[in-house]
Image: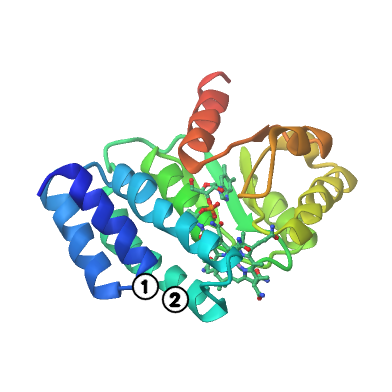
């Protein structure tokens, strides 16, 4: 089975909400030497896009959304360990989390995993994190980077609230803020005063690497 077929199986297994098949396809991807990052971004994540379209078209409902999240997580369990490169030295610390009111964590988890694979020390706060909790974490962990994720148009506003709260606490200039999540845009990130926006986790990690390498 060639790479294109395995990537197709990865996409299909997510769309079909098939946990057993996603596990098999992930194992096959590794056995075939497909880079795990490709299996994630070109395979499973593309399947999640299709699930989102089906949800919008009312072909899928909340139960399917939940299930697709579980399927992707099972696949990530198999692929994530292979992303890590134990030889890379720890570059810098990053705190990541999904903003208040938002429970989506798959994209944030991918970003966190890839950051670790790139050598960053990552503190993952989880989901539904308030501005106060982010500020507390920046104060305690003193990260160079703060990665914020928001997947809902109604929670985008929370990104700005986090930045405002950092300013109030006099911590804004101590940390670079990068934001990501499907509804965001470069313009929005600029408007709220973030240091960067990344359309996907790989681009995000590259920006972070440049930041610490350039210092
Ligand atoms: C799975 C899913 C869920 C699961 C989440 C499970 C989980 N553990 O995360 C569950 C069932 C919980 C869920 C719930 C809801 N969801 Co939902 N969900 C999705 C779905 C299908 C996939 C999201 C996903 O994981 N994508 C795959 C990942 C890999 O992509 P990603 O998150 O965008 O991340 C990538 C980039 O954005 C970026 N990135 C993300 N974060 C960050 C952070 C940084 C720092 C960086 C650099 C990059 C980065 O990198 C990632 C990889 O490259 C999307 C549809 C879609 N295609 O986005 C809807 C979607 C996001 N959900 C939606 C909705 C409406 C809801 C609900 C309100 C439904 C309801 N009626 O209750 C609830 C809200 C719950 C809440 N309070 O958060 C809408 C949002 C519409 C909008 N514009 O606001 C969407 C777009 C579906 C749709 N088309 O209508 N959902």
Residue 211, horizontal then vertical, whole percent: 57, 26
Residue 23 is drawn in which quadrant? bottom left
Ligand 1's quadrant: bottom right
Looking at the rendered structure, which numbered label has been put on residue 80?
Answer: none
**Label 1 crowd bin: few (<14), some (14–19), many (20+), radius 10 Å:** many
Disc 2 designates what residue?
67
**Label 2 crowd bin: few (<14), some (14–19), many (20+), radius 10 Å:** some
In the displayed structure, 20 sits above or below 117; it is below
In the displayed structure, 10 sits above or below 92; it is below
Q: Alpha carbon of mark 2 to alpha carbon of mark 1: how far?
A: 6 Å
The residue at the far right in this view is 168
- Left or right of residue 110, residue 24 in this image: left
- Left or right of residue 187, residue 197 in this image: left
Residue 61, horizontal then vertical, whole percent: 55, 77
In the displayed structure, 65 sits above or below 89; it is below
Dot 2 or dot 1, earlier in sequence: 1
Q: Is mark 2 within 8 Å of ligand 1?
A: no
Given residues 30 and 119, the one toward you in this image is: 30
User: Is residue 162 visible to us here?
Assistant: yes
Residue 73, horizontal then vertical, whole percent: 39, 66
**Element under label 2?**
helix
Residue ID at (85%, 51%): 165
Residue 209, horizontal then vertical, whole percent: 49, 29
- Left or right of residue 213, residue 197 in this image: right
Residue ID at (82%, 40%): 192
Residue 62 is drawn in which quadrant? bottom right
Asked if disc 2 and disc 1 are in contact, CB closer than 8 Å, the reply is yes
Q: Quadrant of the C terminus?
A: top right
Given residues 167 and 70, the one toward you in this image is: 70
Disc 1 designates what residue?
17
User: Is residue 126 visible to us here?
Assistant: no
**Element under label 1?**
loop
């Amino acid at each position: 089975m060639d790479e294109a077929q395995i990537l197709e199986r990865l996409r299909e297994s997510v769309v079909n909400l098939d946990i057993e098949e996603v596990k098999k396809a992930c194992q096959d991807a590794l056995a075939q030497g497909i880079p795990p990052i490709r299996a994630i971004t070109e395979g499973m994540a593309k399947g999640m896009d299709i699930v989102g379209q089906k949800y919008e078209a009312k072909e899928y409902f909340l139960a399917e959304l939940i299930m697709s999240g579980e399927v992707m997580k099972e696949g990530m369990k198999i692929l994530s360990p292979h992303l890590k490169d134990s030889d890379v030295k720890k570059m810098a610390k990053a705190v990541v989390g999904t903003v208040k009111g938002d429970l989506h964590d798959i994209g944030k988890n991918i970003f966190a995993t890839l950051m670790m694979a790139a050598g960053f020390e990552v503190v993952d706060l989880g989901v539904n994190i308030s501005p106060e909790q982010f500020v507390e974490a920046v104060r305690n962990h003193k990260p160079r980077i703060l990665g914020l994720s928001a997947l809902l148009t109604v929670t985008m506003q929370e990104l700005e609230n986090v930045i405002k709260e950092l300013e109030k606490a006099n911590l804004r200039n101590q940390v670079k803020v990068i934001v990501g999540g499907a509804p965001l845009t470069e313009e929005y990130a600029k408007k709220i005063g973030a240091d960067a926006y990344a359309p996907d986790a790989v681009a995000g990690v590259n920006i972070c690497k440049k930041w610490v390498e350039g210092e």
